[in-house]
Structure formats: C-alpha cells, structure tokens
Image (cartoon, rainbow, N blue to C red):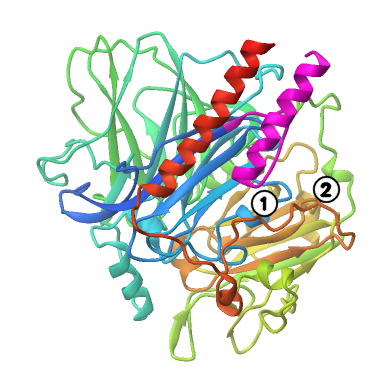
Amino acid sequence: MAPMFRTVTSVLLCVSYLFFGFCSADDPYVFYDWNVSYITASPLGVQQQVIAVNGQFPGPIVNATTNNNLVVNVLNNLDEPLLFTWNGIQQRRNSWQDGVLGTNCPIPPRWNWTYQFQLKDQIGSFFYFPSLNFQRAAGGFGGIVLHNRLVIPVPFDKPDGDITLLIGDWYNRDHTALRKALDNGEELGMPDGVLMNGKGPYPYNSTLVPAGIDYETINVQPGKTYRIRVHHVGISTSLNFRIQNHNLLLVETEGSYTMKQNYSSLDIHVGQSYSFLVTMDQNASSDYYIVASARFVNESLWTRVTGVAILHYSNSMGKATGPLPKPPDDYYYKSFSMNQARFIRRNLSTGAARPNPQGSFMYGRINVTDTYVLKNMPPVVIDGKRRTTFNGISYSAPETPLRLADQFELTGIYKIDFPTRTFVQPPRIGTSIINATYKGFLEIIFQNNDTTVQSFHMDGYAFFVVGMDYGNWTENERHQYNNWDAVSRSTAQVFPGAWTAVLVALDNVGVWNIRAANLDTWYLGTETYVKIINSEITDRTELPLPDNVLYCGALASKQKQQDHGTSAAPVAGRRLKVFALMLLFVAIAILF
C-alpha cells in the first residue's frame, strides 16, 4: 500500500474513535445492531416467552475474521437488566467488554449499549448468550464464526458449506419461573426436551413427540462436505451428538484445530463447542436423523429429553423413519466418555490464527507459579438458602463491578482471600476472588465432588486441558499430564467424583470470570474471579475505561441518563455514523 494511502486510511479509521471509542488502523470493522426483546414461541408445543435478537430465536450468527474489530450495538427491550457474554472470545486487553457482573454494569431496560472489541488472534467456533438472571434458559444465544485470514493455511480442504447447530436441554417454564424455583430451594427436575436451533424434535415417535412441533431441517447436496459447528447452549444436561449413518470428523474446538479424529458420536457438555467435517456420502434412500440425547441419566425415564433434527439430501427419496441411532453403551465401560475427551489432541502442525513453525506451544516446559484446586460439592444450605460453592464459598456479586471498583479505587467491594486448596468450613456466602500474578503460569484443578457432570469455563483465556481422572486429585497426578499436545479451549467437563487439570498462561490483564457453565450451578454461586494486574500503567496490556461505560452501585451517581423517547433512535444513529464512514471511504477511493 502506498504511504499516502496508508496514512489517509489510518486517519479515516481513527475517525471511528469519535463514534466507537477505539482505533485500529489496519483491521476492518464488523457492525451489528441488536434489538433484544421477548417473543412468543412454542418449541416443544407449549406456548412460552423466549428471548429473541432482532426477532430471531436463536439469535443471528456473528460472522467475522481474525483481528476484525467487532461492534455490537445492543438495545435492551426486555423488562429486566441485560448483559451479553462471548463464550470463548478472549477479548485481549479488554475485560471491560466481557459482559459479566464482575466487569460490567447491566444494561437497564430500554437502554442501549455498544460492545466494541478486537477479535485478536482467534479463529474457530464460539457462541454468545445473556449472562444475567438465568436468561440463557429463555434464549438470547447465537453462534459466532471466526474465519482465518487468507494468508494462514487451514489444515483441511475448504468445505462446501458452513452450518451452525445450537443444541441444549429446554424447559417449558420460562426463565423467571426457573429462577424462582431455584430461589425457593427447589431442584429444576428433568428438562422437557432438547432443542436444535430453537426447534423441537422431529416426530420420530408419536408417543414421545406431540403433533405440530416445528423441527430443524439441514439441507445438503450429495457428495459435498460441510463444516458443522455444534454449540451446547443448554442448562445442565450433557448430550451425545450423532448423525445417522454419517461419520463426524472432528477438526476444531473452541478456537483450536485438533488432530483429525473420526466419531460415530461425541459427548458434548454444557458450554462446549465443536466443529466437524461431514461428507454426504450416503445413498439418500431417505432423510437421516440428527440426534442429541441426554447422557449420564436413567435413559428409560429421560427418553423424551432427546433432540432430533433432519439431514435432508437434495435427492432424498423419503422421510426418515424407524428407530434413532443408538447412543454409546457405557454399561461395561464406564470411562468411555472420559477417554473420548482425553484423546482430543491439538494439531501442532498449524497455529490456528498465526503460523506455528515450532511445531509445539511448549507449555509443558513452563514452571507453574500458582496452583488452585477448585472443589465443588452438592448444594448446601447457607443462611437458609440453597447454594452451591467453590471451596466452600458461594459467590455473591456486589452491586459495583469488581473492575470498576478498582478503576475508582473503591475499597470493601470484594476480598482477595480465595483459598488455594482448603475447603472453608462452614460454607459461607461472600465475594472472594483470586489475586493472580501477571505473566504467571496457573495450574487449576477442577475437583467435582457433586453427583452430576459439571462444565467449568474461564473468560478471557483458553487453557490447556492436561489431565482428567476419577478420584481426588493429588500432586502425584501430575505424572500423567499431557505436556505436549493437550487441546486448548475455554470450557472443560469434569465427571462426578473426578477431576480435570488445566494450565493457563496469565498474559491477559483484567478481572476474569471462572464459573460453572451448568446454568443452575452457576446461578447458585459456583464462580469466582481472577484478578490479573500489570503494576506498570500502560494501555499495551489493558485498554482504558471505555467512554460509554455504564455506572452502578457505589458509582451510580456518575451515570448520565439516556433518552428513551424512541427505541429506534440509538440504532438509527449508529447506522447513520457507519454510513457516513462508508461515504468517506468511497470518496478516498475515488480520489486515490
């Protein structure tokens, strides 16, 4: 690019700072306007209120490319506060955009707020969802597809199509009723079904599936290969995913290219994302079932908790009939699912968003600076309330976000006293977080002493999943760690009575959430935060407080009011600014 043109382009892009609060001279912008509201739907045949984005349930897919600047303008037309979080998106240097209560004040009803962050050095399959008040149980979720830059090779041939499939357990009660049940100390009980892309099961069984339910159909061409990205956006039920008579070639999970492995089915746990290459190599004598069924439950009682979609070849000769393809049989092989997870390995021949000439990420050679054993237990009663805990502490979110409190040097909002290994007795409710070392190397062991499978997630980072096994973790377990090609991801499952060990390099400054991905466990208190601060004040490690920051709690007096005269005004204004920028670019292109 000519120096003059580069200079003019940089200046024009920096004009966007006036509108969006940041500037990146070389990387394109991707803009989305979201109107978040309730709509009425009947995914399982029972009319209920769900959360839609731009009238869509599930919400629209976010499509972007590595290093793009993502700008999402959110108008909250719900009757309660709202935040979106970006499951697996690392938001380098920018925890201000994380969308959880530790870093952001909620967007009040009828207000709008704009997320803006760079998709720095990431590729792969992710999803977004509302993080507050059990809202994910009502929808508001959608897929995120981050494409490679053209200069970075992909370790497989370009597929003929790209398909996103959102799966998850679902209740016919809305999120406010589910939330009330948890607040009253009740268990949620068995879900009413499993949705696929917001739709109920295909009528494979007239007894189990009521008439008139809308189901998802995936249309494909014979002989073509498709990349199918599967996201578990549900509440608490692990699911087994399979496509009748078709092979699933695993190629990527949550931003890491994996060694290619063939599966007839794969267990997918709450909060996890996978992408498969699936070749349409069958004879199309009929359509084929796509199935997601409940795992680690009494299958005879949980038969209805099964999602069924249809894979439809363009030359199909009839509808799918007959029994569903069977799930795995672990009666004699209890470690089947764990071994599936153990053998998912990172593809060391590629660097995903960047080249990787070393052939390894060398994480096994880094000395661990801190170890935390995060133990969760079955729910307990604390101060008369049914709660869940990490190391005996049930997290309570303060009215003032942690990172905002730090910014304004407020004290007494939280405590940096989270125990490294000990279990607090008696269990208590508190706002206790981890004070971690910038550029340290953290070992986290998730110890699940509950009776159900739990998933755990860390915002702002991908961690290396180096080991898992049954029993209680001890330091002797380190000899079995995979210190060479462990997969890097942000959500890991932990089986009941078992542990999972992860390693993470603490190079992303901010206050980052660690939580149970299972929605009921998270809601009842199983979470904490990791505080990672660079003592040197520089925007090279953390971006400054955004101009559009919302204030609440002890800082509520600083918040300016918004004009709510028309819900369309914020969105229209944003589009006008974008249009103005486009006109400027066109003018420069003509001149130069």
Residue 469 in which image quadrant:
bottom right
Image coordinates of residue 370 in percent, x first then y, are 83, 64
State which region is magenta: 1-29
Q: Work out how far the residue at label 2 is from the one at label 1, CA to CA, in angstroms.
A: 16 Å
Question: Which residue position holds label 2?
Answer: 540
Q: Is residue 183 visible?
A: yes
Residue 28 drawn in magenta: yes
The amino acid marked with disc number 2 is: Arg
Q: Nearer the viewer, residue 34 or 429?
A: 34
Question: Which residue position holds label 1?
Answer: 460
Residue 11 drawn in magenta: yes
Quick check: 164 above or below 4? below
Image coordinates of residue 184 in percent, x first then y, are 34, 81
Q: Residue at x 38, y 59 (%)?
A: 564
The amino acid marked with disc number 1 is: Gly
Label 2 crowd (10 A; few <14 / some 14-19 / many >=20): few
Label 1 crowd (10 A; few <14 / some 14-19 / many >=20): many
